[in-house]
Amino acid sequence: MEAAQGSYKEAIDWLYSFADNEQVEKRIKARFNLQAVTRLLKLLGNPHADQQIVHVAGTKGKGSTCAYIANALMASGYKTAFFQSPHIFSIRERFRINQQDISEEKFIKICARIKAVIDAMIERDEEKPTAFDVMTALAFVYFRQEQAQIWVLETGLGGRLDSTNVVNPMISVITKIGLDHTEILGETYTQIATEKGGIIKEGRPIVVARQAHLEALETIYRIAADKHSPILVAGEDSSFIDLGLNGPYRRVALKTDAFSIGAHIGMAAPYQIENAETALLALSVLRTYVLKIKDDDVLYSLANTELQARFTIKETANALFVFDGAHNNEAAIALLNALGERFGHKNPRILLFGTSQDKDYQQMFKTLSAFFHSAVLTQANHPRATPMQVLQRDLKIIADEAWLPIYAADNVDEALFVAEEKGQGGLICVCGSFFVAAEVLEILQGEENI
């Protein structure tokens, strides 16, 4: 890539040239430490130093929780940055200020600046950064350059050794912990909670979502005590009452020491209540930093926050679609509850399913199979995608036991055609992978623009 004159595509190609750990075998063996990103950021002037930061880790709900916090801070008048992953349509979605993606021009210029630094590192035979190291550096340089007042940072994987864990945040937040990325983070809730709890900093407050597994919560309590960090736990330091659906919204009553509100949640799946509760608890702590956050600002955030593929509902001439990024069994259970509440009456119900290779797709599929009338198996155009033939082989017994007809398609385009044919006038749920959901969404949006 040339300096600032390089094209946007060249900038993206250069960034993805660092993605040597996308395939499962390489991810297991990959180097996970903070040495390269720390060195890279130092050479860039440590743009993250002395910033007001909210740092969020977790297995489930961290993207939504981040979005609620960021949008409430923005509504309060703060110029708010949000570093999120994964993206759905464009990598620029990962780098947002006040709900606006980074421009292509700024993306190109910052990539050129980082490239010059990394080229010098490579010449000196220093450790090469990973793709997520580079994205983290890009986010920090951009947020500093644009003078964002508060940064909300979502970890990419884990926490302790995640590229973002070079910051010293005002507050850390840990959302619900489940079994995911077990080949890297560990196979028990204690091991995974230890990795997530690595974002807890000495003396800084930690907010924790409701946990389904006591060993995860006990681990976080232990780390917080070791770090002398004040801890607030949803369900202990906060409460909610689910008042049910009200049109496209969910009505809830939420209470913390700082807030007592009745709100409408725009992302209306039941599991979003706990994400909203965790966000509200974090915002309560942020008030102690003399941040001016009004009830109305929180109400705006809860009602207006939207994230693609988080129980996203889209109606077409052919069917009603639900897109959800559920990619582990606990998320599949939450999705199933949301589907049953909202669309248990819809017929026929079709599952369009594809996953990444490192997921427990057999357990997910078993959880979801009883709700649907048929399933279409496919694979995303991504190196981590589970091959359709492998899915078909591994899920056949589960489908037979559930009396669930399964169909197979080599790519998402073909899978959508089959799903629409089988699901005419009914419900099509696209889940198992953000990559699959993104491809279907993109196809449907393209059809709308024809």
Image (spheres, helix red, strand yellow):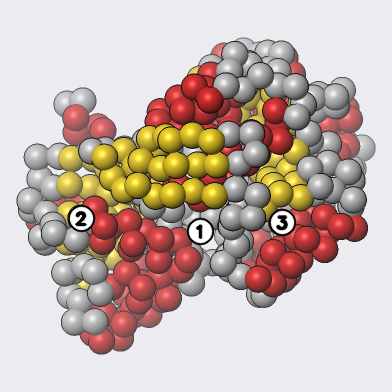
Q: CA distance from mark 1 to mark 3?
A: 23 Å
CB within 8 Å, label 2 to label 1: no
Q: Which residue is mark 2?
A: 343
The secondary structure type at the circle numbered 3 is helix
CB within 8 Å, label 1 to label 3: no
Q: Considering only vertical position in the picture, is 343 above or below 75?
A: below
In this rendering, the label closer to the viewer, 2 or 1: 2
Residues 218 and 316: in front is: 218
- Disc 3 marks a residue whose amino acid type is Lys
- Disc 1 marks a residue whose amino acid type is Arg
Residue visible at 69% across and 64% down in the picture: 217
Across and down, in percent, residue 273 comes to 45, 47
Disc 1: CA contacts within 10 A as few (<14), some (14-19) or many (>=20)? some
Q: Which residue is mark 1?
A: 384
Q: CA distance from mark 2 to mark 3?
A: 34 Å
Whether residue 425 appears in this view of the structure is: yes
Question: Closer to the N terminus: mark 1 or mark 3?
Answer: 3
Q: Considering only vertical position in the picture, is 104 above or below 229?
A: above
Residue visible at 13% across and 57% down in the picture: 346
Question: Closer to the N terminus: mark 2 or mark 1?
Answer: 2
CB within 8 Å, label 2 to label 3: no
Across and down, in percent, residue 249 comes to 31, 38
Q: How many marks?
A: 3
Residue visible at 76% across and 56% down in the picture: 197
What's the mark number on residue 196? 3
Q: Considering only vertical position in the picture, is 291 above or below 169?
A: above
In this rendering, the label closer to the viewer, 2 or 3: 2
- Disc 2 marks a residue whose amino acid type is Phe
